[in-house]
Image (cartoon, rainbow, N blue to C red):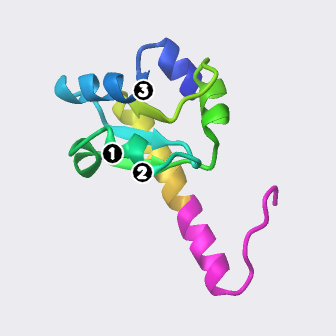
Amino acid sequence: MIGIARRAGRAVVGAEAIRSASRKEVLHAVLVASDVGMNAVGRLGTLADEVRMIEVGASREALGRAVGRSVAALVGLTDRELAARVVALVGADAASSSRNERSGNPRRQGS
C-alpha cells in the first residue's frame, strides 16, 4: 500500500523530501522504521513535534522494500486518507498490545 502511494506521489522518502512536503503543507504523518535512532528523527528538526510520527514494526530494509528502495528510515505520507488509515491501524494495534501486556498475555509475533 505504501509503495503504491509513493508511486502515485502520495508518499515521500527521506528527511529532505519530508521537510519539503511539510513546507508545502501537504505532510500528514511520518512513518519511522523500528531500528532508526534518534539522529534520523532529529534531522527533521521541529517537524517531529508538529506532525504525527508513527513507529512501524519494520526495519529500515523492510520499509525500504515497501517503497521500492534498498533502505528507508523515514517515509512521509502526503495523502490525508492514507495517513488517517495508518494512524487508525497503528492505534488499534497499540491498544490491543497494551491490553495484552496488562493482562499478562503478551502478543507473540505471528499470532
The amino acid sitting under disc 3 is Gly
Name the element at disc 3.
loop
Q: Which mark is residue 105?
A: none
Whether residue 32 sits left or right of residue 76 in the image: it is right
Front label number (1 vs 3): 1
Q: Give the answer, above or below, for where 36 lies relative to 64.
A: below
Q: Earlier in the sequence, mark 1 or mark 3?
A: 3
Q: Quadrant of the C terminus?
A: bottom right
Q: Are marks 2 and 1 in contact (CB under 8 Å)?
A: yes
Q: Which residues are magenta?
A: 93-111
Neighbour class for label 1 at 10 Å: few (<14), some, many (≥20)?
A: few
Image point 24% across, 51% down: which residue? 49
Q: Nearer the viewer, residue 40 or 62?
A: 40
* Percent of width and height locating residue 43: 32, 38
Residue tagged by mark 2?
38
Q: Are marks 3 and 2 in contact (CB under 8 Å)?
A: no
Name the element at disc 2.
helix
Q: Is residue 103 magenta?
A: yes
Image point 66% across, 32% down: which residue? 61
Residue tagged by mark 1?
42
How far apart marks 2 and 1 lie (CA) works out to 6 Å
Q: Residue furthest right?
A: 110
How far apart marks 3 and 2 lie (CA) works out to 14 Å
Q: Nearer the viewer, residue 87 or 63?
A: 63
